[in-house]
Amino acid sequence: MSRWTDFLQRLRGDAHDGERQRWLAILGLNRRLALADGRTAVLTVLVDEAVRLFGAERGFLVRVQAAAPGFAVEVARTFEREPVASPERKLSTTILQRALHQGEGLFSEDAQTGDLGASQSVADLRLRSVLCMPLRVGDEVLGVIYLDHRFQAGVFGERDLPWLMAFADQGAIVLHLHGLLASNRAQAAQLAAHNVELQRSVAAQAEVLAAPEPQLERARLRHAFPGVLGDSPALLRALHVLDRVVDTELPVLLTGESGTGKELAARALHQGGPRRRGEFVAVNAAAIAGGLLESELFGHQKGAFTGAERDRPGLLRQAAGGTLFLDEVTEMELELQAKLLRALEDKRVRPVGGDREYGLDVRIVAASNRDPRRAIADGRLREDLYFRLAVVTVQLPPLRDRIEDIEPLAAHFLAQAARERGQPPPVLGPSLLAALRARPWPGNLRQLRNEMQRLWALAQGGELRPDLLSPAEAVATPTVQVPANYDLAAIERWAIERALRAANGNKAEAARLLGIGRRTLYDKLAAPGDPTG
């Protein structure tokens, strides 16, 4: 305590020592500013103390604004600590504009003489002493703190400029911080309003989807969806929802197991809608590391990071006028989800390492093989991003719920394989078709396509026989036996191989089945003894 007392005593010094008195006043000012409640109260304390300390008659704190006349008076006070009436007409616009334009402090011991004396506003106001300092944050001038005295010359001098700068810095901090707070509050209110609107849309959609379905037939759809094969009731239910949103700009979230054709559905939305002349751009969030994915989506400036040898616009801008298909959205890092949400809300995107924003004109179709509500509960998906992406949600059915579609799908995949070799399409026999329908197809369309390509290769143009199919038990049963001992590494290899088979080789899906991150799975697969080779 004695050390603090000694410090204050040395700081006070002689009662006539003006420099130490000003230091003491600034220390006291900081405390008073901290206790003041609200922007106006803080700025009023600042101006009152500046008027008192510099012996001014009046003080003004002026903020720059875009609208005419280019400034607004935030606080105007007299030496008696009373507000100045009609303050915009009580200060010299010549002095104000000069300080704003030059960005430096200025003073006049007698404004009626010299170049300022020729100013009409100085003459009209009969100003004598003037002291003015810009409020700066970085390179930006936010306003000015302006002191004057109409009746006495020589009140201010050059020695006062650095001291007034200390006051101006305080005022700049207040304006800047309160501006940020106001902006954050406005954005939070806007996001809250958007979320309420989107929640209502999602609830309305759920109500429509829960309503009794009409008789579903392809002929009743307004759009043909030629790339999506099948007529099963399960598929037609999904197409019925897609049909109603093709011609809109609404974001769509496609859900369903891996391999159910989510990208096909996204392409169908794009090709049948008003953005068909634009580009369809697809990106799998699970296949790209988080840091690279940000650059892939938002683009980057040359030199933003090692390897950034040229500017790249990013996929969001590449898809301008078209559609961006964002697959496996629940695998994105949460920080990147927040940046994506802000870009979609503002319809603006800033490349990595850039200082310029670009407008967005893109429709987002997202997809996930996870239940989005479960992903939110598990902390994998931001709820606010979900409401932005899932204005319309469409669940694509697994192949086991589309038994009626197996025949046209298998025929389509076989025809593709035959066409690649310049041969006529084969015929599916009853026995082969029965064998295909009897399988559970955990890998869905992707697994069926791979199986048909394999079958065609083994048949070598001959009869397509059921015995050429992969063993049925290979679909559901791992080829390795469960380790008989308790060797942890062996059990881990067995679990990874089983998960990869269940996911039909999709590593992101295998990681989800194992309950680990995909990067962890990649590390384990890269380690010696990788069961996949």
Image (spheres, helix red, strand yellow):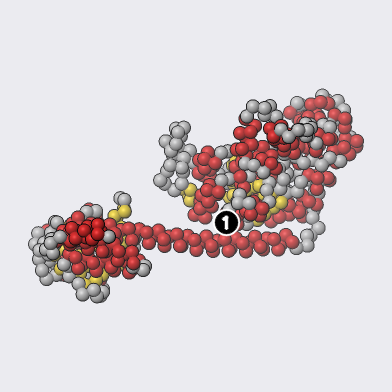
Q: Which one is in front, 178 or 269?
A: 178
Query: Where does residue 55 sit, x and y in percent of width and height?
Result: 16, 67
Q: Residue at x 18, y 58 (%)?
A: 10
Q: Please tell me whether residue 417 is drawn above or below residue 293 in the rendered image.
A: above
Residue sticking out furthest to the right? 431
Q: Residue at x 52, y 55 (%)?
A: 345
Q: Quadrant of residue 452?
A: top right
Query: Where does residue 383 sit, x and y in percent of width and height?
Result: 59, 56
Dividing the image into 4 quarters, which one contains the N terminus?
bottom left
Residue carrying label 1: 384
Mark 1 crowd level (few <14, some 14–19, many ≥20, 10 Å Cα): many
Q: Please tell me whether residue 501 is drawn above or below residue 18 in the rendered image.
A: above
Q: Which one is in front, 25 or 7?
A: 7
Q: Which one is in front, 26 or 168?
A: 26
Dividing the image into 4 quarters, which one contains the C terminus?
top right
Relative to 82, 210 lies left or right: right
